[in-house]
Amino acid sequence: MLFDKLHFTNAAGQRLAARIDWPDEKQPVAYALFAHCFTCSQNLKAAAHISRALTAEGIAVFRFDFTGLGASEGDFGDTNFSSNVEDLVAAADYMTANHQGPELLIGHSLGGAAVLQAAARIPASVAVITIAAPADPNHVKLALGDSKDIIESRGEANVELAGRSFKIKKQFLDDLESVNMQQSIQNLRRALLILHAPTDGIVGIDNAARIFKAARHPKSFISLDKADHLLMNPRDSRYAGSLIATWASAYIGANRLTE
């Protein structure tokens, strides 16, 4: 897979690490912006497999590390859901200025909630795809377990997530409370594809149902069968990528459906 590594600057002036995965011809039919899952990075294998499936269909994929994660600058403890949304908007602005604005917004887990929230601020976007996304970012509090109470009382705590320690501050929790996800979904005004596994033990399938119910048409739901939350089985992430590419073909470039 052809790719270019790069950096762009977020709203706080920090350099965020990114890459663009190119189709073989390097003449994309469209661009997609990918938002990774909570505390993950652009290098998650599932993201790479999805990107490969999209580039095979001529779609360039821009993926990056959110502030304080991977190779990006910043302190993760100072970030929150709103700053993730700002990072997405900054990434889209960079794409628009240097290549082409993203027609597709793809988000995995909390990244799915972020693209739903950011879409209204990314004019080039015509379609949004969520993968194992929570219907409300407040869902991430479940991952914090008993640490949530410590954060509330002490102002911060180190939390073990996926075998790594992250500092979470109370401002992170407060920011989650301020998000009106229902309104953002209702006012999306983009085609929506929801991918979710019925057996997802991290973000339950009921979240997909809530997103689907709140959204207006055109909207679609596809089950990922027995996939786990992070799509760790390459077959599941490749399948998801091929589904996204096929579904999106109706909305991008010359094949874009008219309203």
Image (cartoon, helix red, strand yellow):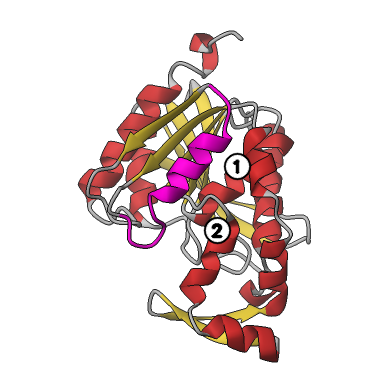
Disc 2 residue type (three-letter): Asp
Q: Do tag 2 and tag 1 residues touch (Cβ < 8 Å)?
A: no
- Mark nearer the N terminus (2 vs 1): 2
Residue 232 vertical position relative to residue 196 in the rendered view, above or below: below
Q: Indicate the quadrant where residue 214 lies.
A: top right
Residue 251 vs 158, above or below: the answer is above
In magenta, the rendered stretch is 200-217
Secondary structure found at label 2: loop
Q: Is residue 169 visible?
A: yes
Query: Which image quadrant is residue 57 in?
Result: top left
Q: Which residue is mark 2?
A: 65
Looking at the picture, does residue 118 appear above or below residue 43? above
Q: Position of residue 21 (x, y in %)?
A: 45, 40
Percent x, y of residue 234: 23, 49
Q: Secondary structure at mark 1?
A: helix
For disc 1, the marked residue is 116
